[in-house]
Image (cartoon, grey):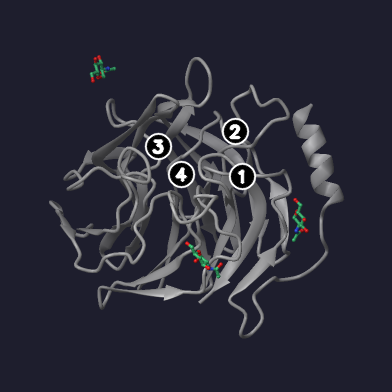
């Protein structure tokens, strides 16, 4: 029933326009709203020239119902339109996702727990999505004790790296972890790696060259838990270890979105901003991994947290997110040009 309604809304909303890029000299460009409505705490990945959003919070009409969703949508950069994809086997928010060899992997997240929401608990569900057949296949769960959401995620070769994350997020608080492990998509096996030097969740992350970077993030909530660090791990060696780079983010924050283009990691927004009434950061800051330095760039037009960014063709796409600290999702979607 719900799917029929949402599909008809989608079909009536299909635009016939073409590729949407910022014009020369323009930094931010507004793109078509997410068609099925507002979304936050979802995960965004790029696959070819499509941008996928997975799960997160999709507010229902009844606010008594936990908004955690299994909805998956894709945005075609070439056609400038949104489409519906096959929903995930289970509703998750703060899920860990990555693309390897043309498939989307979901490796754990947070799921609805008992009692009044929000009471989100670690879920170790792992699945892989084949975009052409539009099917989800179920993989073995995350190893016992490593289930978590909101991990920093990076890809190197066939392997997906997960650093830190949350095992619990709700009215009674949140629990951040230092766990680091990796999933090899070729052998379908997990390995344990050196733990983070400090707990981290809601961080930005990217692999540049051979290094997995974890930027900013927080420990057990904001604003006191917000961090400005760049943690680095060499994924090309068997027994890698973490180091902390000298370059600090100009603005400590968690709930940011980040993506790498070339050797630079771009970090956007976040929550825990005591200087604004919304509690949301507008900062756009770029980390040059070669020089270990940060630069401040043009702020977000609509400051957001609780979304993730995906880089395609030298542009960074940021769908939805929260425009109010904690809950306050939007369907707004824009792209940042370097
Ligand atoms: C997105 O939706 C809002 C209302 O929620 C509307 O004001 C705005 O014009 C829409 N933007 C686009 C680009 O369609
Ligand atoms: C998982 O680990 C917990 C302790 O952390 C243990 O009590 C439980 O038996 C383990 N479950 C399995 C299936 O190994
Ligand atoms: C960005 O946010 C800061 C407060 O954190 C504010 O002072 C500044 O004016 C904002 N910039 C823009 C362009 O909105």
Residue 143, how many percent across, how many down?
A: 29, 29
Q: Image height check: is 229 above or below 66?
A: below
Tell me which label, 3 or 2, sits earlier in the chain. Answer: 2
The answer to whether residue 208 is left or right of residue 72 is left
Label 3 belongs to which residue? Answer: 149
Q: Residues within 10 Å of mark 3 (few under 14, many from 20)?
A: many
What kind of element bears circle 4? Answer: strand
Identify the residue under disc 2: 69
Give ligand 2's quarter of the image. top left
Q: Is residue 119 above or below residue 51?
A: above
* Residue behind label 2 places its C-beta within 8 angstroms of ligand 1: no
Q: Quadrant of the N terminus?
A: top right
Residue 236 is left or right of residue 56, and the answer is left
- For numbered disc 2, what is the local secondary structure? loop
Nearer-N-terminus badge (3/4) = 4
Q: Quadrant of residue 70?
A: top right
- Looking at the picture, tell me which residue is in the foreground, 41 or 86: 41
Q: Earlier in the sequence, mark 2 or mark 1?
A: 2
Residue 130 screen position, x and y as percent: 55, 45
How many numbered tags mark residues here? Answer: 4
Instruction: Tell me, yes or no, whether the two marked residues, 3 and 2, touch with CB atoms within 8 Å.
Output: no
Query: Which residue position holds label 4?
Result: 105
Is residue 52 placed above or below 191 in the rendered structure?
Answer: below
Q: Nearer the viewer, mark 1 or mark 3?
A: 1
């Amino acid at each position: 029933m719900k799917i029929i309604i949402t599909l008809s809304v989608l079909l009536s909303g299909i635009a016939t326009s073409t590729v949407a890029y910022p014009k020369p000299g323009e930094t931010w460009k507004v793109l078509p709203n997410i068609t099925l409505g507002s979304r936050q705490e979802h995960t965004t990945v790029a696959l070819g020239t499509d941008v996928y959003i997975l799960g997160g919070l999709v507010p229902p009409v009844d606010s008594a119902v936990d908004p955690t969703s299994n909805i998956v949508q894709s945005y075609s950069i070439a056609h400038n339109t949104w489409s519906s994809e096959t929903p995930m086997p289970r509703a998750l928010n703060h899920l860990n996702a990555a693309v390897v060899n043309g498939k989307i992997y979901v490796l754990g997240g947070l799921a609805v727990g008992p009692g009044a929401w929000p009471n989100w608990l670690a879920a170790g569900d792992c699945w892989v999505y084949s975009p052409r057949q539009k099917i989800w296949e179920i993989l073995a769960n995350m190893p016992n004790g490593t289930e978590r959401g909101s991990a920093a995620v990076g890809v190197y070769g066939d392997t997906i790296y997960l650093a830190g994350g949350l095992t619990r997020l709700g009215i009674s608080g949140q629990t951040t972890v230092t766990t680091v492990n990796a999933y090899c998509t070729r052998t379908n096996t997990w390995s344990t790696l050196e733990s983070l030097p400090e707990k981290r969740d809601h961080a930005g992350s990217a692999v540049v060259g051979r290094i997995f970077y974890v930027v900013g993030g927080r420990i057990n909530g904001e604003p006191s838990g917000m961090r400005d660090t760049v943690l680095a791990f060499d994924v090309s060696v068997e027994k890698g270890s973490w180091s902390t780079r000298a370059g600090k983010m100009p603005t400590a924050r968690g709930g940011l979105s980040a993506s790498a283009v070339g050797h630079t990691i771009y970090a956007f927004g976040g929550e825990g901003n005591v200087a604004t009434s919304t509690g949301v950061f507008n900062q756009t800051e770029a980390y040059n991994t070669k020089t270990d330095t940060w630069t401040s760039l043009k702020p977000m037009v609509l400051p957001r947290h609780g979304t993730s960014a995906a880089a395609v063709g030298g542009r960074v796409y940021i769908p939805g997110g929260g425009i109010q600290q904690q809950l306050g999702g939007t369907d707004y979607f824009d792209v940042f040009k370097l």
